[in-house]
Image: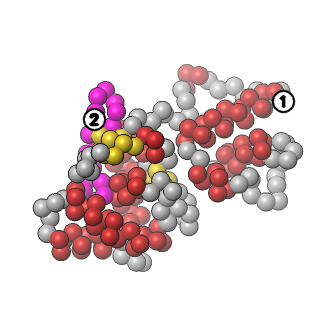
Amino acid sequence: MGIQARVAWEILFGKTGVLEEPEVKYGDSERLDLLSARELFDLLQKVQEKLQEKGYDVSIDKADGPISPEPQTLHISKDYRILIDCLGLKEITLRPLLRAVFILFLRHPEGIRIKEKQAYREELLDIYAHIFPNLDPDICRERIDRLIAPGQNAFSENLSHLNRALTSILGPDASPYQVYGSNGRPRRILLDPVYVVWE
């Protein structure tokens, strides 16, 4: 999470409740990394109220709408088609490899460290084989091995492609479904798992 979240955490749960530069990191970084988008929005609203009590003008123009869009439920079929609740069920169409990566991250809401990508080889193979059932198994293995090859950037590049594809499909409502995370820490989809229905 960014500095704003850590400041918010310090105001609400710090010892003094005063904005000052601490000698240590703001709040509990592990807890901050696990916050869902909705929890973070609620946390920032509480901070806004607390600052208003102290006499600060922190009004937000309501015309700008909420900080984060209310997520729609995803429905994942047995063959890993991705459908979203918006005006009925709309399919999110992604290339097979991007869809496999997306499904992998949905299966792991706790997040995945890029340096540990090879640990997910068999799971990725299984997902990709279900998405692309008629693909030659050797080609399937070759593509997944290339995706998670040590010392290569294919996995990170595919995460970037995935996020861009989701923005292209969903526009400003894409953020809850995209993969976020800083270097060295688990990357994860911010969408709360309650918004994912597996068939």
Q: Position of residue 109 (x, y in %)?
A: 47, 53
* Residue behind mark 2: 90
Q: Name the residue nearer the viewer: 23 or 42.
A: 42
Q: Look at the picture and state if 172 lies above or below 96.
A: above
- Looking at the rendered structure, the secondary structure element under dot 2 is strand
| Three-letter amino acid code at the position of disc 2 | Lys
Report which quarter residue 38 is drawn in.
top right
* Residue at the front extreme, as displayed: 199
Tag 2–tag 1 contact (CB < 8 Å): no
Is residue 52 inside the magenta stretch?
Answer: no
Q: Look at the picture and state if 84 lies above or below 34.
A: above
What's drawn in magenta, residue-wise? 84-100
Name the residue located 24 percent from the left edge and 74 percent from the top edge. Answer: 142
Is residue 99 inside the magenta stretch?
Answer: yes
Report the mark closest to the observer, 2 or 1.
2
* Residue behind mark 1: 54
Report which quarter residue 66 is drawn in.
top right
Q: Position of residue 176 (x, y in %)?
A: 46, 42
- Within 10 Å of the Cα at label 1, are there few (<14), some (14-19), or many (20+) other Cα atoms? few
| Three-letter amino acid code at the position of disc 1 | Lys
In the displayed structure image, the side of residue 2 where residue 88 appears, left or right: left
Residue 175 can be seen in this image: no
Name the residue located 38 percent from the left edge and 68 percent from the top edge. Answer: 120
* Residue at the bottom extreme, as displayed: 151
Q: Position of residue 44 (x, y in %)?
A: 66, 37
Q: Name the residue nearer the viewer: 134 or 53.
A: 134
In the displayed structure image, the side of residue 142 where residue 27 appears, left or right: right
Q: Disc 2 and disc 1: Cα gap in Å?
A: 46 Å
